[in-house]
Amino acid sequence: MADLLGGKGANLAEMTRLGLPVPPGFTITTEACRSYLRTGREPETLREEIADHLAALERRMGRRLGRGEDPLLVSVRSGARVSMPGMMETVLDVGLSDTSVRALAGQAGDDRFAWDSYRRLIQMFGRTVLGIDGSHFDAALAAARREEGVDTDADLPADRLRALVEEFKRVTRDRGGREFPQDPREQLALAVDAVFDSWNTDRARRYRRQEHIPDDLGTAVSVCAMVFGNLGPDSGTGVAFTRDPATGRPGVYGDYLRNAQGEDVVAGYRNTVPLAELERIDPDSHRRLTGIMATLEQHYLDLCDIEFTIERGTLWMLQTRVGKRTAAAAFRIAAEFAERGVIDDDEALRRVDGAQLAQLMFPHFDPAHRGEPAARGIPASPGAAVGAAVFDSARAAARAARGERVVLVRQETNPDDLDGMLAAEGVLTSRGGKTSHAAVVARGMGRTCVCGADTVAVDEAARRAVLPGGAVVEEGDVISVDGTDGSVHLGEVPVVPSTVVEYFENGGVVRDGDTGGTGPAGDGALVRAVDRLLRHADRRRVLGVRANADTGGDARRAARFGAEGVGLCRTEHMFLGERRRLVERLVLAGTDREREEVLAELLPLQRADVTDLLTAVDGRPVTVRLLDPPLHEFLPDLTELSVRVALGGDGEGDDARLLRAVRRLHEQNPMLGLRGVRLGLVVPGLFAMQVRAVAEAAADLRAAGGDPRPEIMVPLVATVRELEIVREEAERVVADVAAHRGPVPTVPVGTMIELPRAALTAGEIAGAADFFSFGTNDLTQTVWGFSRDDVEGSFFGGYLERGVLPASPFETIDPAGVGTLVRTAARTGRATSPDLGLGVCGEHGGDPASVRFFHEAGLDYVSCSPFRVPVARLEAGRAAVGGR
Amino acid sequence: MADLLGGKGANLAEMTRLGLPVPPGFTITTEACRSYLRTGREPETLREEIADHLAALERRMGRRLGRGEDPLLVSVRSGARVSMPGMMETVLDVGLSDTSVRALAGQAGDDRFAWDSYRRLIQMFGRTVLGIDGSHFDAALAAARREEGVDTDADLPADRLRALVEEFKRVTRDRGGREFPQDPREQLALAVDAVFDSWNTDRARRYRRQEHIPDDLGTAVSVCAMVFGNLGPDSGTGVAFTRDPATGRPGVYGDYLRNAQGEDVVAGYRNTVPLAELERIDPDSHRRLTGIMATLEQHYLDLCDIEFTIERGTLWMLQTRVGKRTAAAAFRIAAEFAERGVIDDDEALRRVDGAQLAQLMFPHFDPAHRGEPAARGIPASPGAAVGAAVFDSARAAARAARGERVVLVRQETNPDDLDGMLAAEGVLTSRGGKTSHAAVVARGMGRTCVCGADTVAVDEAARRAVLPGGAVVEEGDVISVDGTDGSVHLGEVPVVPSTVVEYFENGGVVRDGDTGGTGPAGDGALVRAVDRLLRHADRRRVLGVRANADTGGDARRAARFGAEGVGLCRTEHMFLGERRRLVERLVLAGTDREREEVLAELLPLQRADVTDLLTAVDGRPVTVRLLDPPLHEFLPDLTELSVRVALGGDGEGDDARLLRAVRRLHEQNPMLGLRGVRLGLVVPGLFAMQVRAVAEAAADLRAAGGDPRPEIMVPLVATVRELEIVREEAERVVADVAAHRGPVPTVPVGTMIELPRAALTAGEIAGAADFFSFGTNDLTQTVWGFSRDDVEGSFFGGYLERGVLPASPFETIDPAGVGTLVRTAARTGRATSPDLGLGVCGEHGGDPASVRFFHEAGLDYVSCSPFRVPVARLEAGRAAVGGR
């Protein structure tokens, strides 16, 4: 009943039902809150119902709220369906007044305790109900401590606390515009409204936006009899987990603080003791507590965390819930519960997620050895990179070739930096967001990347960077970059590698070894858990998982990570580096003959590339995409070249000739220009050369006894005619190779669906396609009219902050826009051609939420970067068993 | 029955039915042709049916095909449903052979005629049936002329023609691989197949693609008894129109050639005489002919053209059809037929179209005074411009301010050229296609433009252009630019203004005056015709027509042209010129205060702009679009500025500061960057300033007794949240103005639908919008992934040529892609909000075919450039009466 009672209220009711010692109370439903928020007033009957329940509580306790010699006090706590820790308000000790504080002192035999409770109530009430700035109370407290010469509030004597109560009442009057109410029922009513209101504070809204929690859930309010852990040495309070939430290791785990209330534990100025100590202090309570924890784990069939209080030797359970845990613990707990048969493997799969698995696949810095970061940026590609800072890609590649570990530091990266990025351990940029070139490419390569570190002044020419504190990083200085949290450290921070990755790299073999450990690294139990859950995901999933891989090395790695083929090989990566000179010649070619010569030189190179790839995943499909980017991407930058030519003053040199070509090819919006299939139709022979390379490679491998399975994919198709023309040419070329070189396996020809028009006319396009592969990156760009190179740095931050975008549509597929087109195209494409293959090869193929979407849209496979393959496998399995 | 018999066959049958003298014959259906083309062979029963019909023809004529003393000869002519003049084949004189040629000579009493007919048959047969290159026959003819010392084939004597027949038979044998068939029935069968085949020649396919004629219609084949116009002075041939096809003036009109066959008229080496001469030569035939023409016009209720032959005093009708005519004639004929009550006004409206009206609205060069063009480009915006060539916009504006007429000549234009383009009579560019900046802006302004004249070498720095012949145009030299046909002329060509435009500018008053004239100019009858048909269109049309206008002047002009309001005012045009400096300050503003100061300076300027516009069309809606383009469009070009700074060597000057800002704002793909509503959400106060300007202008006008009806339009919305935020702010600002300045009329707030995502989520967006205006320009760019600035110059030509694109989607809306989104968004938007206003303000709003689409999609109005308003009115009316 968490929807109605909130998580906290439902669990309190559940514990009560289980006969566990829960302070009596009642919960006001989220429905009441929603009505209040909608209308701005309490529901008609709420006052009455609260009065009835309070009366029942008073009868049960034999005490009256804030009245009599043993006054009942209550806590008023928020509790939404989804946990929003620290986001909403709580008012404790409701019921205290100038009268009842004395009765409480008498009952507790402790003046100090009573007045301290009273001042806390006024303080919380003032802040929460009346909206008084907390600093006014803090200042008074600080002055009192100063005057008494003590360090902590706990050391303030009773009379000082009594004086503080008066002062707090004055603050309430002056700042809150009213007297602190002496009527306990009025306190209660106002506290309930304040908790309702706290649903809509800015920080709560922000938190919900961040966590994708709907704004219209509302919170429940639990009203419980107060119990006190600060009534002497036989009292205390604690938090506990039914097993270690960091590692998942079995065995209770927690902290206990003697003679204290919960808020003292949170405040942290008194030292807690491990839960084991309680066994010595109060063996009875310890025994009852461990018994209860076993009951709870047995009941919830999961790790639980609890809050408890011992009031003069009596144990009270204040709260329980299925506990938060680290990624490693999540896997280990789910797998071990499944192994013990407590839950089935489907349920175990539902309890972990791809984001957790991704975390486990990155090395991390040893927490014991890292201090405060020297700078911060956007965590763009997780992992821990350590190396010498190098400010250009050529030098980075050169240093790496000498065996040095380097971190590439740039203002921003571009396709020219690919070699440098490949060579580097990590990349740090001062510009660009999570979908900048650096971020996208680094994620694709599995390189650590922190981008947009705008407080780092990178001077590429001077080969140095100045950090916010003024520290200077010269080229060669070692830095450590944490792609998981975006921090940048000077010097070397020790790195712990990922055992999960080692497991994949070893071909999915679980090594014997320890079963404990403190983190994901070196943890055999963790690896066994990942293994069990991934195997189960593979059994369950309907979606295939392929990898985006441009080289044989990438493809082999992807296969070790479980990829069932290559869903995207970007041939443009074969036009970089040394071969760039050939592209320059292609562009400058004045005659058909010159152009054909260049293509003839490119043919064996492309054939070798494709051969390498087909060999790496022999027997599995390899989708080769024909050249996609505009030719000028392979040429120098227009502005740089213009400046060079202007400074050189030589109007007729090689640079000037090149500049003319660059100018001719320059585009205002290259994303929307002469690229993809358009390039193939405009540059005669280009696509034919690429198809020939594929067909020849396949023919040769087949002749050698292999089982090559290439597929040809045409990029940026907007109308079926484009595909038909390329298809006809491809079929001609393949037939020619078959006639002159030897049998060629069937080469399916398909197309990217990456333009809205392709999606809208998918029914027609399917008539000429063996398969569709959704290019959701470009589709997102065109559907939204966003260039990812441009928008992240300019307004994405503000858009996410203001909730205009719930999430970056480049990270998680936008179901209403891009998603609608994907579903439409899948449906109309299959209507034309029921055997049409359907895949996706955008970055979304490795995003957990998006994988679920593709599963539901009925695609055949996703293709993602090799590193993301296990994540996609897991999520595809979770989608199949209905995991959320 | 034109579908089955082709246009020609159906009209021949119709004339026969009317009892007119048509040479007997029969027509083979298009169905037979389609079957032949599909299967590669004649339908089973075709031979037999031809034999039956031929036998019937022979019986009727009392002669046998190619046999006997008076052999029957037949013509075999193609005739598709849609006329494809000169595209397909004809074989005449079928039936002649070595035997029958002598019989024909005897019958005609003319040896020369018989042998000439025979050599023509062999020549046509060789080319058409056997595919022999015509040059082989031509060479033999030329040699014969040389040897005989004569100038024309008509002067060759009979014996030479007999020798030529032998030579032609040898060519047929050597080049065609077979003897010329002596069997007349074999000749006929082969000729029929050859006509079928001619449907699929390259040139026929190309023609159909150009004219949007489906490829699968096929042609019919008419087989008719031959009649001869070359049997002596009492024979002849001619073409005639039932009224003047150039002006539409009533009265028959045509040419006659004595003693000749139709092909001699076409070849043009003998002079025809006006049809009136026939009255003198052969009064009987002339009387019969004019009677027949009256019958035909009465029957077809339209201008007809005919071909006729007189064979020894007997008149034969060879062909008739509803005749082609100029735009002026089309209007005049349709209106006059309607005025006479022969057809109704709906039908008259169906017989003209928007493209014709557009033609009539441009001044044109006097055909008598123009020679060969000095260069050619793409006709991008029609009209005739004469002026001094000027190579930069500032000087163009300065010269124009001195009263000089100028033509702006640039490699290409950009937003900086707006003043120069406004000042110029016309624009000539050497780069860019029909949708380049120059073309789009010139069309919007109604300025003549020829773009992409790539043979003109424009040297802006040297202020001169070199033309293909080597002629040099220096700044100040007068040139004449024809935007209707793309030609460029040296010197001044006299211009004839458009009477139709004068009529609009005079407020739609038809002047008295002449009723004749030879062209659209100075033609009172034409103006009356346009007036009648436009008024009828206005009565019929359901679509409203508004104009895109940025100034009061534009808006007033648009109103004179019949616009019912302003559908798009682009406020960015108010940020140009002098105000550009304010934008620079806005961009460079380091503090909120500086930014607010700039906005405060912009406010009164914007208010004055809006006041001007609202005053111009008081009482009608004015849709003001908030700032759309990215800020860097108002700043200097990155590359130019980089070079300037590099050459200046001054790292800290004003240019260097500006360069840093330009770099910061530089975008890879500005189309997809920080613009439109994104800019409004990122630059605080910008949109609020614009809304305030609108609200203040409206409040002031209302206070002064006016009826201002402003609407606010938000550009580039992708998600409803963007619109909600701007809407909330706009409502706040309007309320504030109302509170402090005086009552403001209701200001509807709507949005452009110009991104696929906006269209896909239109149902949501409609919840926050009072109206949608489809921005089909941007929608086309994003749906296709085309940047119009980039693609026209690079691959559009090739795409149109290869039929990848049937038409530029920037000119005529693409129904399958962009159109689907428009229909979807209109439907889902109205489902959310039945009162939602729906309009379109892309350039398509003025395109005839697109206007029909918007009518069918159920929009409320189109908005187009003022000049296109009458075209849109006419087409909206035609759409309503089902005109095609």
Image (cartoon, coloured by chain):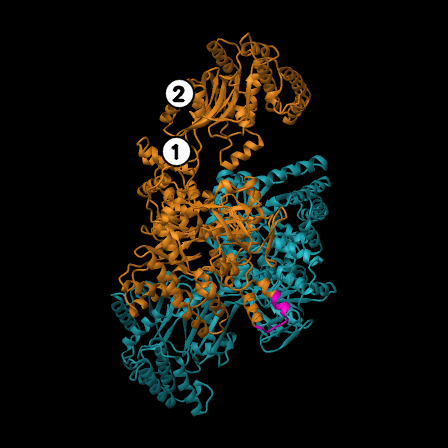
Chain colours: A cyan, B orange
| Image quarter (top left, top right, bottom left or bottom right) of the C terminus of chain B | top left
User: What residue is drawn where x is 30% and y is 56%?
Assistant: B619
User: What residue is drawn where x is 58% and y is 76%?
Assistant: A468
Per the image, is A409 magenta?
no
Give the residue type at disc 2. Answer: Arg
Q: Which residue is mark 2?
A: B287
Q: Is residue A411 visible?
A: no
Q: Is residue B842 left or right of residue B410?
A: left
Give the image location of residue B39, x and y in percent. Answer: 55, 24
Q: Is residue B554 left or right of residue A591?
A: left
Q: B299 or B456: which is nearer to us?
A: B456
In the image, residue B485 above or below residue A535: above
Q: Which residue is mark 1?
A: B249
Give the image location of residue B723, x and y in percent. Answer: 40, 59
* Element type at mark 2: helix
**Crowd band around label 1 with a 10 angstrom C-alpha radius: few (<14), some (14–19), many (20+):** many
Per the image, is B645 magenta?
yes
Q: Is residue B409 left or right of residue B354?
A: right
**Crowd band around label 2 with a 10 angstrom C-alpha radius: few (<14), some (14–19), many (20+):** few
In the image, residue B462 above or below residue A754: below
The magenta span reads: B643-653
In the image, residue B313 above or below residue A521: above
Which chain does the numbered disc 2 sit on?
B
- Label 1, label 2: how many angstroms apart (C-alpha)? 20 Å
Give the image location of residue B571, x and y in percent. Answer: 42, 60
